[in-house]
Image: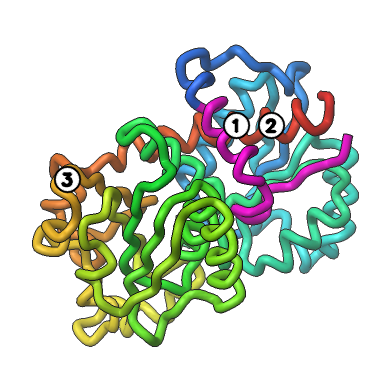
Amino acid sequence: MSIRHFLRDDDLTADEQALVLRRALELKSAPFSRRPLEGPRVVAVLFDKPTLRTQVSFAGAIAHLGGHPLVVDGNLSQIGVRESIADTARVLGRQAAAIVWRTFGQDRIEEMAAHAGVPVVNALTDDFHPCQILADLLTVTEHKGALRGLTLGYVGDGANNMAHSYLLGCALAGMHVRIGTPASHQPDPAILARATELAAAHGGSVLVTDDPSAAVDGVDVVVTDTWVSMGMEGQKGERQGAASPFVPYAVTQELMAHAAPDAIFLHCLPAYRAFEVEAGVIDGPQSVVWDEAENRLHAQKALLSFLLEDHQGA
Ligand code: NVA
């Protein structure tokens, strides 16, 4: 069976995404029912950027699947500095059942996947955060039922990893996805084109607008993300200052009132209550962010099970 990677949301087909989400629900009610990593086999979990949720949820997922998570700090491994990515991949692939990596450029994780010989999972790059979107779709499923036909409105930085992953992941799920973002921070055109194609194939749609109210008008799910992604710390002043182009896109209670009355609010966290979201929203009755954070565990467990059991005969 061929090795499968999960480097971006559309590395799964729509049917496979649905299967992973169904399996996540099964695993949520029967946490230790699948043991593809029994041994324990080691999964290498590598971080070139900060982490909390991702480290804990992957460590838990790997342990529940019978395996052992070996978490390596990027300051120690210095992948691409001490040793090429290709050589690192060859070494890890001889000893680990899978590799989970949070890093900067998408090209880095593609290089890892090309040489590892074992499944490689994107735990966030500058371009995508596909594991988070699986957790988000699981959360929406739990609160809203079927995904197809629902509308999600994301407001904030339209050019970041979360915006890109919502575009692809929601389009695959047959959802309508809207991105509300300033003209200066539009999604990558190639990713937008791919999302538009996927939406057309699966019954959804894609809209990018600079009008924050239009982005959330009547939607079922409102979502935002930090205005200062990891690696952008040097731009903090311009992104979070009073003149930030993102200020009109903050999820205030007033903006939230444009969504459907029973809309839910998602945020991948960490959240900055003085900036992209008001405390009254994230700490209010429509917020499901703690379910969302928990669902990282269940979604990633289902993903690893899919990659290891369905595609490697583990
Ligand atoms: N866009 C954010 C997501 C954090 C989970 C970042 O890259 O820092």
Q: Secondary structure at mark 2?
A: helix
Q: From mark 2 to mark 1, how far is it between C-alphas?
A: 9 Å
Which residue is at the front of the view, 227 or 199? 199
Q: Which residue is mark 2?
A: 306
Q: Are marks 2 and 1 in contact (CB under 8 Å)?
A: yes
Instruction: Look at discs 3 and 2 and give the one toward the viewer.
Output: 2
The amino acid pointed to by label 2 is: Phe
Examine the rendered structure and indicate whether residue 24 appears above or below residue 105.
above
| Residue found 27% across the figure and 83% down from its top | 244
| Residue found 58% across the figure and 72% down from its top | 193
Q: From mark 3 to mark 2, how far is it between C-alphas?
A: 34 Å
Q: Which quadrant of the figure contains the N terminus? A: top right
Residue 78 position, x and y percent, is 72, 61
Q: Which residue is mark 1?
A: 19
Q: Which residue is mark 3?
A: 283
The amino acid pointed to by label 3 is: Asp
Region rendered in magenta: 1-24
Q: From mark 3 to mark 1, how far is it between C-alphas?
A: 32 Å
Examine the rendered structure and indicate whether residue 121 appears above or below residue 39.
below
The amino acid pointed to by label 1 is: Leu
The answer to whether residue 49 shows anywhere in this view is no
Q: Which quadrant of the figure contains the C terminus? A: top right
Q: Are marks 3 and 1 in contact (CB under 8 Å)?
A: no
